Image (spheres, rainbow, N blue to C red):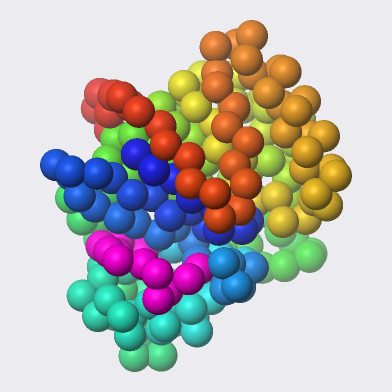
């Protein structure tokens, strides 16, 4: 599994043969400069956890659709309705290899409206919870929101220790400066390594390959 972070919560996940499947999670406005549509060779799925603009850029989705008109778009019902207003078809039904899990968006009041949200297990290997620290299950690879106006790094770390994924991918950290990101990544690695959890310090645009991931039984 090759994973490329494209800012904030946007992940490009590419599976080699025999799976041969590529998905883009949460292409939001922060990711517009980093998602190089022209260089993408394959794109089977776009998964949108919720409709906040840092997770959904409609212009970017439209641009992706121009190149990949058959791409499947999976999103919560409210986002399906929003996209339909822009002549973009999406579904809130899970395709093969996509499983929803309960991952409610953390409360944003009074800063912003709390949206409808889906958490997604992908191929039984990777879990993307959107904007939540309240979920109770994960695949071996967890995309972990590490900081947010609605949450804190302390809760993120404690949740990870509770769930014990094999790997952690830090997401939702656009709010940090590069210096803060480097410092916090180092601290997270120090805390999680003794727990038997590998923290992967993703850098925007740099692919990282995880080998021999066993899908989670029952997911």
Q: Residue at x 79, y 64 (%)?
A: 110
Residue 216 seen from this side: no
The total number of labels drawn is 0
Q: What residue span does the magenta drawing correspond to?
A: 35-46
Residue 169 seen from this side: yes
Residue 72 in the image, given as x and y percentages of width and height: 26, 68
130 left or right of 190 in image = left
Q: Residue at x 31, y 80 (%)?
A: 67
22 vs 41: above or below = above
Residue 92 in the image, given as x and y percentages of width and height: 31, 64
Q: Residue furthest left?
A: 18
Residue 42 on the magenta span? yes
137 left or right of 190 in image = left
72 vs 101: above or below = below
Q: Residue furthest top?
A: 194
Q: Residue at x 30, y 55 (%)?
A: 22
Q: Quadrant of the C terminus?
A: top left
Q: Residue at x 44, y 45 (%)?
A: 3
Residue 201 figure quarter:
top right
Q: Quadrant of the N terminus?
A: top left
Residue 81 in the image, given as x and y percentages of width and height: 39, 80
Residue 40 on the magenta span? yes
């Amino acid at each position: 599994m090759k994973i490329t972070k494209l800012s904030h919560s946007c992940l490009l996940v590419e599976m080699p043969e025999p799976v041969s499947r590529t998905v883009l999670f949460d292409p939001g406005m922060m990711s517009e400069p980093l998602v190089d549509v022209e260089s993408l060779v394959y794109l089977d799925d776009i998964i949108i956890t919720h409709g906040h603009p840092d997770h959904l850029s409609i212009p970017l989705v439209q641009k992706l659709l121009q190149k990949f008109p058959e791409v499947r778009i999976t999103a919560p019902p409210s986002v399906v309705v929003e996209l339909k207003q822009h002549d973009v078809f999406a579904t809130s039904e899970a395709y093969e290899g996509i499983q929803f899990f309960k991952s409610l968006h953390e409360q944003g009041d009074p800063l912003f409206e709390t949206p409808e949200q889906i958490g997604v297990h992908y191929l039984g290997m990777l879990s993307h919870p959107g904007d939540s620290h309240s979920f109770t299950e994960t695949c071996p690879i967890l995309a972990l929101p590490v900081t947010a106006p609605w949450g804190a790094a302390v809760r993120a770390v404690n949740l990870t220790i509770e769930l014990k994924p094999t790997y952690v991918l830090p997401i939702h950290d656009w709010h940090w400066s590069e210096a803060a990101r480097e410092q916090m990544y180092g601290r997270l690695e120090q805390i999680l390594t003794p727990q038997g959890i590998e923290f992967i310090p993703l850098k925007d645009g740099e692919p990282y390959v995880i080998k021999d991931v066993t899908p989670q039984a029952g997911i």
